[in-house]
């Protein structure tokens, strides 16, 4: 009896030791369940992604959903990300704080929404009269932009990767014509970020209102004009019912980056392959969104003009040229606020100048002749 008991016991010990080591090597997790009855499949890691977008909002909200789906699929379900629209867990403009505090592991928005934390963040969204989508991506990925972005977010315990881009936006919806700068004076307009600051200097009452509240704000007369994104999103919101003139080009947002925001502790706790998957999924989502905008905006522009009779207007040359010189002043002042801003600005400016020289003889030259 005693001998039999001994064999059974040692046999069990040996069996469970094998099981634990197999669980440990297969799960890739730091927390294997050391249960003696055997190896259980690794439990999926569950993340929440809070976003600044209304539920199912075309391209932006669905872009965040796409990002989560990519992470789920690439990881074979090992990392499962649930997406929350603005207001479901936190309001749109509180996403950064919520991820910073660890309320959610991930967020989707754009850096300029958090300019209350640091005005320097705006360089990582878009700069008026600055770089377009391809140039911005090139700066972030190959021109030192990502390292500066990491440095900017470091004090808040978060990190971001490009995970979408609006490409060149529209200047916005107005109910009166803009022929001179005087026409802008006194207008209450929704225009966030640096573009808003530029508008403030020409006498516009610039404000930031989350997308979901915009139609009501414009319809009720709380604002007289609004910019949002471009034809596809603007058509979905029905701005053609409350705005007469649709102005271009979107000088204030020539290639706005949407970010995949991660809580650094949550990110660091992932095995390295899942970290790589999160970053790769952001890259896929980035390209997916930019190309979706190209495909959808051209169809929507046609619908707005041909079916809804929207009057498409180009901002006059002298208005644009004035807005450009004010933009340069605003960005220079932003750069002068502290040493870190100067560093980001210098990197941005240098890359922009070089990229411009190349874009002029490539993209611009081609667009002009085709
Ligand atoms: Ca916009």
Image (cartoon, rainbow, N blue to C red):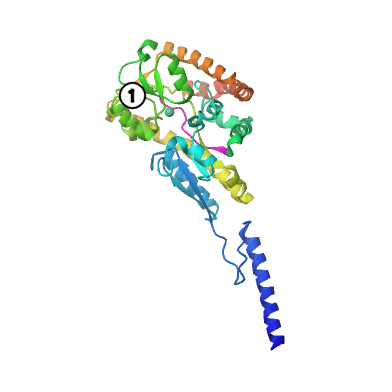
**Residue 177, placed above or below residue 49:** above
The answer to whether the beta carbon of the residue marked 1 is less than 8 Å from any atom of ligand 1 is no
SS of the residue under disc 1: loop
Residue 345: percent from left, percent from top = 60, 22
Quarter of the rendering containing residue 283: top right
Instruction: Say above or below: 250 vs 104.
Output: above
Range shown magenta: 159-173
Query: Seen in the image, is 192 located left or right of residue 138?
Result: left
Image point 48% across, 49% down: which residue? 69
Crowdedness near tag 1: few (<14), some (14–19) or many (≥20) residues, C-alpha within 10 Å = many
Residue at image x 61%, y 33%? 146
Residue 310, percent from left and from top: 30, 25
Residue 158 lies in the magenta stretch: no
Percent of width and height locating residue 16: 65, 71
Is residue 360 visible in the rendered image? The answer is yes
Magenta stretch holds residue 162: yes
Residue occupied by mark 1: 223
Residue 305 can be seen, yes or no: no
Secondary structure character of the magenta stretch overall: strand
Q: Report the number of discs.
A: 1
């Amino acid at each position: 009896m005693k001998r039999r008991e001994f064999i059974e016991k040692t046999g069990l010990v040996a069996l469970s030791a094998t099981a634990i080591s197999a669980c440990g090597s297969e799960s890739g997790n730091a927390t294997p369940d050391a249960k003696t009855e055997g190896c259980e499949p690794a439990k999926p890691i569950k993340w929440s992604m809070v976003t600044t977008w209304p539920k199912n909002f075309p391209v932006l909200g669905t872009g965040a959903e796409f990002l989560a789906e990519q992470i789920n699929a690439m990881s074979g379900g090992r990392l499962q990300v649930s997406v929350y629209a603005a207001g479901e867990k936190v309001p749109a403009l509180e996403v950064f704080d919520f991820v910073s505090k660890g309320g959610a592991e991930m967020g989707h928005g754009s850096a300029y929404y958090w300019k209350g934390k640091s005005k320097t963040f705006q360089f990582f969204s878009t700069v008026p009269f600055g770089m377009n989508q391809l140039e911005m991506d090139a700066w972030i990925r190959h021109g030192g932009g990502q390292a500066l972005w990491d440095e900017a977010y470091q004090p808040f315990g978060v990190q971001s990767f490009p995970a979408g881009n609006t490409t060149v936006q529209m200047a916005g919806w107005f109910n009166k014509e803009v022929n001179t700068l005087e026409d802008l004076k006194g207008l209450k307009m929704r225009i966030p970020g640096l573009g808003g600051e530029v508008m403030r200097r020409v006498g516009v009452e610039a404000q930031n209102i989350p997308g979901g509240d915009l139609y009501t704000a414009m319809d009720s007369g709380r604002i007289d004009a609004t910019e949002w994104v471009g034809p596809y999103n603007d058509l979905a919101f029905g701005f053609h019912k409350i705005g007469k003139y649709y102005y271009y080009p979107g000088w204030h947002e020539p290639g706005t980056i949407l970010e995949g925001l991660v809580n650094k502790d949550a990110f660091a706790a992932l095995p390295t392959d899942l970290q790589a998957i999160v970053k790769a999924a952001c890259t896929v989502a980035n390209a997916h969104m930019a190309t979706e905008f190209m495909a959808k905006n051209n169809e929507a522009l046609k619908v707005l003009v041909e079916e809804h009779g929207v009057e498409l207007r180009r901002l006059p040359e002298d208005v644009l040229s004035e807005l450009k010189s004010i933009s340069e002043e605003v960005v220079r002042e932003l750069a002068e606020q502290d040493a870190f801003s100067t560093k980001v600005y210098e990197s941005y400016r240098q890359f922009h100048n070089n990229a411009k020289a190349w874009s002029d003889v490539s993209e611009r030259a081609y667009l002009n002749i085709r």
